[in-house]
Structure formats: C-alpha cells, structure tokens
Image: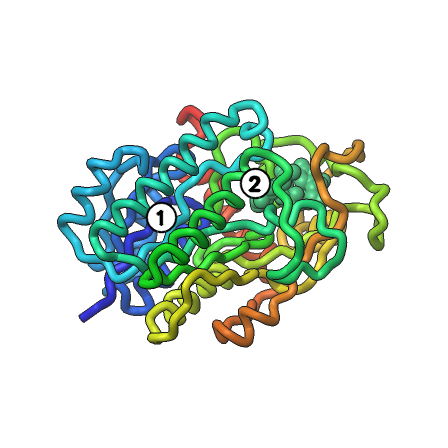
C-alpha cells in the first residue's frame, strides 16, 4: 500500500514541487495550506503534472492554528509521515510583526506536533533554513556550525529545531529530520509551477524574474563592498526540484528502520554564486537585460553563505544535480509563461 504523507504548506513554492515528486515517487499526499501566501491553482497544476498519480493528492484549506480542523484530518487518514513547510517567511515583516510570526510559526507547529503525537504519527521532516547560521564566521556551513538567529523569522526556525530535539529526547519513538535549505530558486522544468510571492518580492530571483517580465524597472543590488569576488553577496542557490528530491531522500531515511531521533541536514549545492553572477546567468537564459542600481548593504545580510553538503550526500544519498544555468532556464520558463504567477494581472496582489 502507498505510504501516506501529510504536507503542510503544500500549495507553496517548495511545498508544491515536493508534493509533485512525492506523487511521482508513488506516495499519497494530503496537502493542508491556509493559502496565505500560496494558491490553490498550484495544487491543481501539480495534479495535472502528476498524470496517472494525480488522484493520490487531496487538499484541505486549513490553518495549523485551527487544531480541531487538524484533528479532523488526522481522524480521517492514518499518516506514515508529515512534511512540515507551512509558515511565514518574510524577514522584514517578522521584525515589524514578531507576534504574528511566533503565533503562526510556533503555535502552528506545536499544534501539529501535539496532534501527530496523539495520533501515533511520529515521523517528521521539517523545513528549516540556512538562516539559522546567521552571519557565518566560516564557510562552508556544516551542520555543526554555530547557530544564531538574527530576526524573529530566524528565531522561529531555531525554536522549532529545538522543540523537535526536545520531543525526540522526551519520547524516543519520534523520528525527525530537520532540513536546512540554502537559497531555493528555479521552477519545475515544465514551467507549470513556480514561485509566486504576494506583493514585492524580498528575495533575489523572484525580483529579477519580475523585472524580466516588465513588472518592475530595476534590481537594487544590496552592497558591492563585501569581500567577495565582485563585492556582491554570495549565496548557495539550489534548484527547487533538487530541493524537493532532498525531501524524498529524507523520507526514505525515516522509513529505512534506522533510529534517528532528531537529525539535521543541509540542503544546498556547496557552491557560492554572487548577485552579479546570478544576474548574468539569468540574462543569458532569458535574453533580457536586468538594469541594476547599486545601493548599500541590506541590514542583517551576510556576505558569504554556502553549504557543506557532505552529510546529506553520505547519509541521505542525495546530491543536487542542477547548476545555475538550469536554475535560470527554468525560472525564466516559468516566468515567461506565467508573468503574473498563478493569478491574472487584474487580481489583487
Ligand atoms: C533571505 C533572508 C533569509 C531567508 C532566505 C529565504 C534576509 C535578510 N534574509 O536570505 O533569512 O532564509 O531569504 O530564501 O532577508 N539581493 C539584492 N537585491 C534584492 C534582493 C537580494 O542584491 O533585491 C541580494 C542579497 O543582498 C543577497 C542575495 O541577493 O546577497 C540573495 O538574497 P535573498 O534572495 O534575499 O536571500 P538571502 O539574503 O540569502
């Protein structure tokens, strides 16, 4: 019988790509999402892309803070595991509205863990972030590097990691894998699903993509005085399909019978790319010029962040396959066929 996986936040950017890989891998997926920063259209497109496996997906519009609704989902299905993506993720907004972030991300997760525990489902993959490394003193970041959250959003990721450790100590039947994502970009090669943030994008690639389709005039480059090859910030960009596959590798590890407790893996490529290199790769892939405006550093930004990927390679048998050219190709393919994301230009954004 197919393994059943509950995916919170499965309508979002990383969630939708992961749900597709789950279906194609023979899993059944139940998606819950409050559609706060995502669209049900993404879920419908995943069903189409999954072809004969599309019938193995069901969707419920639920907010994790609604514990009774969560209880109902668990009462109707016995899950083998949960992949937990749901959460707010805008750094600037988290500084302005910390309680919203603590309520949404922490209360939502505590509800989920309680309902999982009381229903005997104790296999979890949690969506953490390289943000927990703060300003790394040394790169590459290994899973043992010092941790430091720089804002409420980052603190919610760090707190949830700690909560997961604590419950695995209190009850050894929990098996939890924390995945620290570096910078997810790109889209499914079909161009049918991709990233569609509400409002002004905070992150580099969605911003560049909106310039290329004519929605914004120019890119503000935050800082060109870092000690990097061209002075601009260096990050470890990872293709979202590679990232999605990393979740399947983590699930396989959960199901292989080994005693995990709570373990953590970086998901990145191990390669650093500067802002200007990324812009150049995108210009090449799209044939569009991205006008640049140089400005000061963005508060809170680190100069260089990239991952050590050895642990995931060795223990999850997972490695990123795609480079920045494929990331930009697929980002452009998605952007050019869906310039307004999942909505029409007339919908409120
Ligand atoms: C940001 C968040 C981080 C979060 C991650 C999620 C901040 C301070 N950090 O990380 O907590 O986990 O997204 O994906 O928001 N850049 C520009 N111009 C832009 C946008 C970005 O020059 O308009 C530069 C940044 O300075 C950085 C690089 O592009 O050097 C990547 O930025 P971004 O995509 O926002 O990712 P992070 O800063 O790594």
Residue 30 locus on image (x, y percent): 25, 52
Q: Residue at x 73, y 48 (%)?
A: 275
> Can you give x and y, in whole percent of width and height, for residue 325 in the image?
64, 61
> Is label 2 in a helix, a strand or a loop?
helix
- Residue at the spot x=46%, y=51% of the render? 127
Give the percent coordinates (x, y) of residue 223: 79, 38
Name the outermost residue toward the front. 170
Does residue 186 appear left or right of residue 16 in this picture?
A: right
Query: Which quadrant contains ligand 1?
Result: top right
How far separated are the C-alphas under marks 2 and 1? 21 Å
Residue 324 visible in image: no
Who's the residue at 35% across and 48% down the image? 10
Q: Does the residue tagged 2 have its C-beta within 8 Å of any atom of ligand 1?
A: yes
Q: Position of residue 171 (x, y in %)?
A: 34, 58
The N terminus appears in which quarter of the rendering? Answer: bottom left
Q: Please identify the residue farthest to the left as the structure is shown.
A: 76
Q: Residues within 10 Å of mark 2 (few under 14, many from 20)?
A: many
Say the numbered circle drawn on residue 10.
1
Task: Indicate the quadrant where residue 295 lies.
Answer: top right
Q: Can see residue 137?
A: yes
Left or right of 97: which side holds 113? left
Q: SS for tag 1?
A: loop
Q: Counting other residues with Cα less than 10 Å from the Cα at mark 1, is it few (<14), some (14-19), or many (20 or more)?
A: many
Q: Nearest to the eye among marks 2 and 1: give it.
A: 2
User: Which label's residue is closer to the chain start, 2 or 1?
Assistant: 1
Number of marks present in the image shown: 2
Q: Which residue is mark 2?
A: 154
């Amino acid at each position: 019988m197919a393994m059943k996986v509950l995916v919170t936040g499965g309508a979002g950017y990383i969630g939708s790509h992961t749900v597709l890989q789950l279906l194609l891998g023979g899993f059944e997926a139940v998606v819950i999402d409050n559609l706060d920063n995502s669209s049900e259209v993404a879920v419908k497109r995943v069903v189409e892309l999954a072809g004969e496996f599309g019938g193995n997906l069901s969707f419920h519009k639920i907010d994790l803070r609604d514990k009774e609704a969560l209880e109902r989902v668990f009462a109707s299905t016995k899950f083998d595991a949960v992949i937990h993506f749901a959460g707010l993720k805008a750094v600037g907004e988290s500084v302005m509205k910390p309680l919203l972030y603590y309520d949404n991300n922490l209360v939502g997760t505590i509800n989920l863990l309680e309902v999982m525990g009381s229903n005997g489902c104790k296999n979890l993959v949690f969506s953490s972030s390289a943000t927990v490394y703060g300003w790394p003193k040394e790169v590459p970041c290994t899973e043992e590097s010092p941790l430091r959250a720089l804002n409420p959003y980052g603190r919610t990721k760090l707190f949830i990691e700690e909560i997961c450790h604590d419950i695995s100590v209190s009850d050894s039947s929990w098996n939890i894998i924390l995945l620290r994502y570096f910078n997810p970009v790109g889209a499914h090669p079909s161009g049918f699903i991709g990233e569609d943030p509400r409002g002004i994008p905070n992150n580099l690639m969605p911003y560049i993509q909106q310039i290329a389709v004519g929605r914004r005039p120019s890119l503000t480059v935050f800082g060109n005085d870092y000690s990097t090859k061209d002075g601009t910030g260096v990050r470890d960009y990872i293709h979202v399909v590679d990232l999605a596959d990393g979740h399947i590798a983590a699930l396989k590890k959960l199901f292989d019978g080994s005693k995990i407790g709570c373990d953590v893996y970086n998901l990145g490529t191990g390669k650093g790319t500067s802002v200007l290199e990324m812009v150049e790769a995108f210009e090449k892939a799209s044939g569009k010029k991205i006008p640049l405006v140089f400005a000061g550093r963005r508060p809170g930004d680190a100069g260089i962040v990239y991952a050590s990927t050895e642990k995931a390679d060795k223990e999850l048998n997972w490695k990123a396959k795609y480079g920045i050219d494929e990331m930009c190709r697929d980002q452009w393919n998605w952007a050019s066929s869906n310039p307004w994301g999942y909505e029409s230009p007339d919908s409120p954004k």
